Image: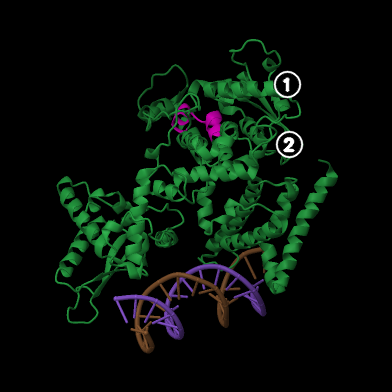
Chain colours: A green, B purple, C brown
DNA sequence: ATGGACCGTGTCCCGCACTC
DNA sequence: GAGTGCGGGACACGGTCCAT
């Protein structure tokens, strides 16, 4: 990368921006509006391009995400400053246009334009429609437990018959996950590792089979495949201290295996290639998001890049935190953490750990950042924890004389006393939980069957519907029940559908889909669909009765309910109908938690009126607002009902 | 009873002109 | 560059009327 190409990409970026402005003009916007659009992020955009020497044409999804996250951060900062100014003046203005939300919309518009005209990839940061959501998902970290689940899901994926051609690629992906999670490598850095990037003397003498290598160091540098962000991203990552013992062995084994192939065919020199092919970064991003979706449901905001974020935070804790903190948050043993510090900071510096200054620099260069600031502000979400941890554990020195003046004479051989010794005796967390280490189940070591138990019934249902778990017969039965229910409730012609049609094949699937879509729309962005954690009070004696009433209510809903728009209708014509409705209410109402209530219209029914339909709706209450969420609740009830076999016995 | 057409309401967001 | 008032479109929702 010479200065000339740097300049070129800077100009390209500017042209892109100008092109967008022209496009806005063509759309008929007035100049004043376009001006404010440009003002939303234009300067910062160009600044970031220049600062990080970015080439937009070469950017991966993760690079875009980084860039946009930074821009949105600048935007929020502008907002914060405005709030401060206002609070000085003593007014609390409700912002209208030039707000972070507004600028978020402009940036989204710009990126959409780039997607259409410059083949830019879709970006997760901007996909979420609500701006607030973004701030939450920004700080998501992958815990060792979650990472274990991710690997497990990947393992499941490679067990599927359709994946048979991809098994080797998926094994590579697993190693990429591992390396990124432990070392914080970017997607393209790990994806495009070359055999030549591996520094390992033992590889060259291929003598003993079963030795453990002393170390394997990855040299992260620019190469023709990889598109690195900056030249400063030239760095070396020692794997022996970054990985656990077992993980190191797994990686070593793979490298040995690939090296032998490489000796035969030196053209094929990418570490993770299978017959000259490596999974594309888009493909990896998509698989990763899908796997997380399987674990966490929709709208989780996790991506491959989250692994890098997690690595940064766990490294920060491991390098800078106290023993307690390390044990609580990471799966790294304390002994290993000490070893890491010795190696990275140097033994001498470690001896005076309190005062060494270059710790942050070590972390930043490990991550491939040119400045400490960059790591701290973009990647570290645990700074406050680290600060508290540090304060809590730092020595609290007080002069012996002061103590003696206040209290009685003090026994001490020195003039100073470290009070921390005494305060620490009432540690808040002297019994901390040791985090369980990540388990790396290999294909050979463990036989995998799709573990249905780890999926919720809802996930199994949806997986089955999408053909991912076609052999799950239980889910198949549930699906049929659901289709029957949604058809009976929603299809105006099929109100009289009999239960013996539950397993008939010619039910229309669209009714279920419609209900599912409606439920999704009513779900708040931070929720997974089955949000209604129906409340049961602990009182055991009441439980049996409550359960009985609930089953009764569900049976009534099953047989007599009608879903019209956002309302649940019950006819009240025959003599028994009135009692059924009462039963329904008494069974349902105790299930609803604090945020839901059952709203009743035309109840009790006026038996003389021609119209004798009771209309129920479920209302979600937030503060003083209420919202009709009937389809969502019905969908949830349906999920419950499909599992209750007693409802389906003839 | 059912479905279609229409309408009023409320909310959200956008565009524009304007001021400081 | 930040902020505001106003107008207006898109949309969801519910209600009403009417024909079948």
Circles 1 and 2, Cβ within 8 Å, touching? The answer is no
x%, y% of residue A360?
A: 62, 33
x%, y% of residue A172?
A: 60, 32
The numbered mark at residue A232 is 2
Asked if both marks, 1 and 2, belong to the same chain, the answer given is: yes
Q: Is residue B8 above or below residue A10?
A: below
Q: Depth check: give the residue in front, A624 or A449.
A: A449
Q: Per the image, is A318 magenta? A: yes
Q: Depth check: give the residue in front, A439 or A611.
A: A611
Residue A361 vs residue A456: left or right?
A: right
Chain letter behind tag 2: A
Q: Quadrant of residue A487?
A: bottom left
Q: Quadrant of residue B7?
A: bottom left
Residue A167 vs residue A586: left or right?
A: right
Chain letter behind tag 1: A
> Can you say which quadrant of the picture contains the N terminus of chain A?
top right
Helix, strand or loop at label 1? It is: helix
Sequence-earlier tag: 1 or 2 = 2
Reading the image, the residue beneath label 1 is A263
Q: Which residues are magenta?
A: A314-329
Give the residue displayed 35% in from the left and 30% down from the top: A426
Query: Circle 2: is it few (<14), some (14-19), or many (20+) Cα within 10 Å?
Result: some
Query: Circle 1: is it few (<14), some (14-19), or many (20+) Cα within 10 Å?
Result: few
């Amino acid at each position: 990368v010479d200065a000339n190409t740097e300049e070129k990409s800077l100009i390209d970026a500017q042209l892109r921006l100008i092109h967008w402005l022209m496009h806005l003009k063509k759309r008929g916007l007035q100049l004043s509006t376009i001006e404010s659009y440009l003002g939303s992020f234009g300067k910062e955009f160009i600044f970031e391009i220049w600062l990080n020497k970015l080439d937009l044409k070469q950017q991966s999804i993760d690079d875009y995400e980084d860039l946009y996250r930074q821009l949105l951060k600048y935007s929020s900062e502008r907002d914060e400053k405005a709030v401060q100014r206002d609070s000085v003046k003593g007014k609390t203005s409700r912002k209208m246009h030039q707000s972070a939300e507004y600028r978020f919309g402009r940036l989204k518009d710009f990126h959409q334009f780039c997607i259409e005209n410059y083949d830019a990839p879709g970006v997760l940061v901007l996909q979420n429609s609500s701006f607030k959501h973004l701030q939450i998902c920004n700080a998501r970290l992958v815990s060792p437990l979650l990472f274990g689940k991710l690997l497990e899901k990947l393992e499941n994926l490679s067990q599927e018959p359709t994946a048979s051609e991809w098994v080797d690629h998926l094994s590579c992906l697993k190693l990429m996950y591992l390396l990124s999670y432990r070392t914080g490598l970017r997607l393209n850095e790990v994806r495009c590792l070359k055999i030549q990037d591996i520094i390992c003397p033992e590889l060259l003498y291929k003598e003993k089979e079963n030795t453990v290598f002393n170390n394997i160091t990855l040299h992260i540098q620019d190469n023709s495949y990889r598109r690195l962000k900056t030249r400063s991203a030239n760095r070396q990552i020692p794997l022996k201290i970054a990985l656990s013992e077992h993980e190191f062995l797994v990686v070593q084994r793979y490298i040995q295996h690939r090296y032998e192939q490489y000796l035969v065919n030196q053209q094929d020199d990418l570490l993770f290639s299978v017959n000259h092919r490596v999974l594309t970064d888009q493909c990896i991003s998509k698989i990763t998001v899908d796997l997380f979706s399987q674990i966490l449901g929709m709208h989780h905001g996790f991506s491959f890049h989250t692994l890098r974020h997690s690595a940064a935070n766990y490294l920060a804790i491991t390098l800078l935190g106290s023993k307690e903190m390390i044990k609580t948050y990471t799966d790294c043993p304390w002994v290993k953490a000490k070893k890491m510090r010795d190696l990275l900071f140097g033994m001498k510096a470690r001896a005076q750990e309190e005062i060494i200054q270059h710790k942050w620099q070590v972390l930043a260069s490990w991550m491939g950042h040119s400045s400490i600031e960059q790591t701290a502000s973009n990647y570290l979400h645990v700074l406050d924890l680290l600060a508290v941890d540090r304060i809590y554990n730092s020595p609290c020195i007080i002069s012996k004389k002061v103590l003696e003046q206040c209290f009685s004479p003090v026994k001490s051989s020195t003039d100073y006393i470290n009070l921390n010794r005494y305060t620490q005796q009432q540690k808040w967390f002297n019994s901390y939980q040791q985090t369980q280490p990540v388990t790396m189940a290999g294909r050979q070591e463990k036989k995998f069957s799709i573990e249905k138990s780890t999926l919720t019934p809802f996930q199994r249902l949806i997986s089955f519907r999408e053909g991912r778990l076609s052999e799950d017969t239980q889910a198949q039965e549930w699906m049929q029940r659901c289709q029957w229910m949604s058809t009976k409730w929603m299809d105006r012609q099929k109100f009289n559908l009999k239960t013996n049609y539950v397993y008939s094949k010619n039910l229309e699937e669209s009714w279920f889909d419609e209900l599912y879509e409606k439920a999704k729309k009513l779900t708040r962005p931070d929720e997974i669909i089955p949000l209604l954690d129906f409340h049961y009070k602990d009182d055991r004696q009441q439980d049996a009765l409550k359960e009985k009433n609930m089953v009764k209510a569900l049976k009534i809903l099953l047989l007599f309910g009608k879903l019209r728009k956002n309302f649940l209708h019950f006819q009240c014509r025959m003599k028994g109908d009135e009692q059924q409705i009462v039963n329904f209410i008494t069974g349902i109402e105790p299930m609803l938690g604090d945020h839901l209530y059952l709203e009743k219209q035309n109840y009790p029914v006026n038996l003389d009126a021609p119209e004798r339909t009771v209309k129920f709706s479920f209302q979600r209450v937030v503060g003083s607002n209420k919202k009709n969420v009937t389809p969502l609740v019905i969908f949830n009830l349906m999920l419950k009902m499909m599992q209750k076999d007693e409802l389906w016995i003839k």
